[in-house]
Amino acid sequence: MSCTIIVGGFFGDEGGKGKIVAHVAHKDKPSIISRGGGVGPNAGHTVKVGGEKEYGVRMIPSGFVFPDARLFIGTGVLVDPRVLKQEIEYVGVDGRIFIDGRCSIIEEKHIEQDRANEYLSKTIGSTGTGCGPANVDRVQRVATQAKDVPELAPYVIDAAQEVNDALDRNETVLLEGTQGGFGISLYWGTYPYVTSKDTSASQIAADNGVGPTRIDDVIVVFKAYPTRVGEGPFGTEMTKEESHSLGIEEFGTVTHRERRIGCWDGKMARYSAMINGCTIGAITGIDNVDEACYGGATEYSQLTEKALAFIRQAEEDIGVPVKLISTGPEMTQIIDIR
Ligand code: IMP
Ligand code: MG
């Protein structure tokens, strides 16, 4: 009986924000999980299910692992029909995935434009998935909408109406931030090294047609050691030698580029929590802070003093309690004191 937003607090790839979504979905049992607040298939989410299978999804909400929810793609999110179709088959969600008819479509020409554009591909480090050019077409008012693509007809709905109707019936709805994180927001991020849209919690609500008064909680996911892919400023970035010596090495879900790795940035965390209206903090990768925390802990009392000190600092920075702590890649490796 609530509407919760989950959003990334730093530069994206919040150490399995997808996994936090999957966990929250299993615990809160939403009737709808809907994606918003991001651009489109430039964002990748990794979800590990049942010990062996790891899924990387770019269009489908990462909450798909919770089988009882309908899955939506909100109005403001770009849809690449080819990626969508592939993922529907790969993940097996036909029959419960729907997209808003007003979503703009990414066409082959957008991908070509993205990749051929030196400024976007080299200077900004775009993912080359056609998102920026597709958003340009939307602004120019020449974009194709999902409702005008016959092959998408089986999936097209009024997602905003469905979400608001569910809330009227007192059901639980999860709004999942499509995009990496706060730092790549078109407005709040490190402009111009950003993506082509706002990525904040307000945008996630807006993309789903949910007014601000209907949001109950905003979970902002922070990575203990933030990462960034692509170009742009990264205040607390470490050298590769430093991060490798800490045993941290990561690659992007979409582009497979090696991620840049940094230390906790309290100042950015505070600002991000403010703009996102954070009510609940989530920390991922606590096992990078202290290896001894890997996997097993299900309660605060099982964390080490080093990890607890880290969490206390994070709480001071973001100004609200940290109630979710991820201790490993598995969906079950989490502390949840909500
Ligand atoms: P674009 O959105 O593909 O044009 O990429 C613009 C910038 O945002 C590049 O630096 C990308 O690496 C970054 N970016 C886009 N989407 C994501 C994401 O989901 N996670 C992390 N970085 C992203
Ligand atoms: Mg990602």
Image (cartoon, rainbow, N blue to C red):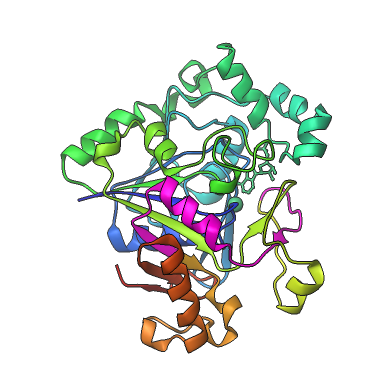
256 w.r.t. 70: above or below? below
Outermost residue, left side: 169
**Which quadrant of the figure shows ligand 1?**
top right
The C terminus sits in image quarter: bottom left
What residue is at 29 percent from the left and 59 percent from the top? Answer: 28
| Figure quadrant of residue 213 | top left
* Percent coordinates x, y for residue 286 in the rendering: 53, 75
In this rendering, does residue 258 appear at all? yes
Instruction: Tell me residue 257's x, y (percent).
Output: 76, 53
- Vertical relation: 211 (above or below) 247: above
Q: Is 267 colored magenta in this rendering? A: yes
Looking at the rendered structure, the number of numbered marks drawn on it comes to: 0
Residue drawn at point x = 53 percent, y = 63 percent: 266
- Can residue 64 be seen here? The reply is no
Q: Is residue 157 above or below residue 266?
A: above
Residue 157 quadrant: top left
Camera-nearest residue between 173 and 94: 173
Residue at figure coordinates x 47%, y 88% from the top left: 305
Q: Where is residue 8 in the image (x, y as percent from the top left)?
A: 50, 52
Give yes or no for residue 323 being in the magenta stretch: no
Residue at the image position 67 percent from the left and 48 percent from the top: 254
Which of 316 and 168 lies nearest the eye of the viewer?
316
Q: Position of residue 314 (x, y in %)?
A: 47, 68
Tell me which segment is drawn in magenta: 254-282
Q: In this view, does 334 lie to the left or right of 26?
A: right
